[in-house]
Amino acid sequence: MRSRRAHIASYLISLLLLISLPLKAEHDSSLDLSIGGRVKIDAIYNANSVGGTRTSKSDLAFSPTGIPDTSRNSFDANLRESRVWATLRLPVGKNSLSTYVEFDFFDTKKDASGRSHVANEPRLRHLYSSFRNFTIGKTYTTFANLSSYPEINDANGPVGNLLVRQELIRYNTSFDWGEIFFSLEKSESTFSLSTGSSFQVNDDQIPDIIGKIKFSESWGNISIAGIIREINTDGKIAIGSNDKQWGAAFSVAGRLYIASQDNLRFALSLGNVLGRYASFNAFNDAAIANTGKIDLTEIIGSHLAYQHWWTTTLRSSLAIGAAYANQDTSIVPNTSNKLFASSHMNLLWSPNRKLTLGLEWLHAYRELENGNNGKIDRLHFSVIYKF
């Protein structure tokens, strides 16, 4: 299904090109099409390989649940984080309708024998349209403050982040002091079972409800966001049981400028419906008993990053993050995840606006409910060229 969506989106880009090029030739200045992207080369050495299935991307991009408890080193070089994007703007009266689409090459596919594996297939990251105060389509959740995300080599980032892309309808309005956002977003409930396995329900009828207020000044910005969700089993466990619970969570995040270009980026999130929103679903939304009864997972997550500019082209970021879940071990097994922590430290150099070279060290830790733990150390070299 994801591959089909990627192909559909690629056809849309081709259609935009076919439509726009003749119009450009006729010097129609009312239509604005811009195409760009980046080539990113990653060379990654893992002192402790996460291993996993052929569909696992944890050796290529940091995943908290992929932190191992055994020692196996590995090396990988790839261009999967390269991206291509296009923006089309059309005049509508005195306003403009803008459509944005973006791909990377981090999808999975099936080979001739039907086995899934990490491939270089295009993956749809964003596809949305904006008109006046409304945005409709797939993009980053309103719950996140993207300016709080640290500049690092890794695709996923520190534990404690809220970097989720999904379908949504969003309204926002601007004031002298900042912005207000309100959105309805795709609902999807993820559950932990007493057996240690998990499942998800992605046909919930009620969308996730998110509101955010963001204050912006010369000193930086701070946002306060809240989310309300219905977690619903949809009768997947006990026949005739359609147990559901409402829950809420909030997040405070932002970026503060310290001196010159130096800045502090942070986020703190707390609630009982953070599950799939926090740290790439490191914890599920709820645990579910054999009777179908739901127990929402209380989660707290946070990250803090300081960026220092050595020169106008050379900078470093130190980012730390942690996430903790309070789970009922009478429902979930003691092999369930309890605590995650991570740290990133890098040196990035941009000799010009289009080229960036970076070297980064990652250390991460995972602890289970039974006290067992594991760690990973990763050295990550990247080259990014924007076009």
Image (tube, grey):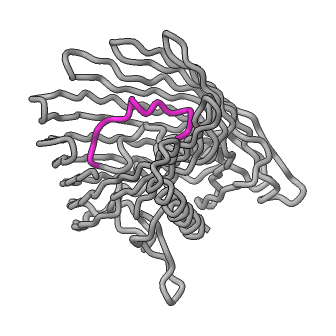
Q: Residue furthest bottom?
A: 113
Residue 123 x/y as whole percent: 48, 62
- For the point 29% across and 23% down, the residue is 264
Q: Residue furthest front?
A: 26
Residue 41 x/y as whole percent: 24, 60
Residue 206: which quarter of the image? Answer: top right
Above or below — where is 188 with respect to 309? below
Above or below — where is 217 with respect to 197? above
Q: Nearer the viewer, residue 358 or 234?
A: 358
Magenta stretch, residue numbers: 140-153
**Can residue 273 be spotted in the picture?**
no
Dominant SS type (magenta):
loop
- For the point 42% across and 53% down, the residue is 85
Q: Residue furthest top?
A: 176
Q: Quadrant of the N terminus?
A: bottom right
Q: Nearer the viewer, residue 255 or 245?
A: 255
- For the point 34% across and 26% down, the residue is 265
Residue 281 x/y as whole percent: 52, 48
Above or below — where is 66 with respect to 368? below
Residue 148 x/y as whole percent: 39, 29
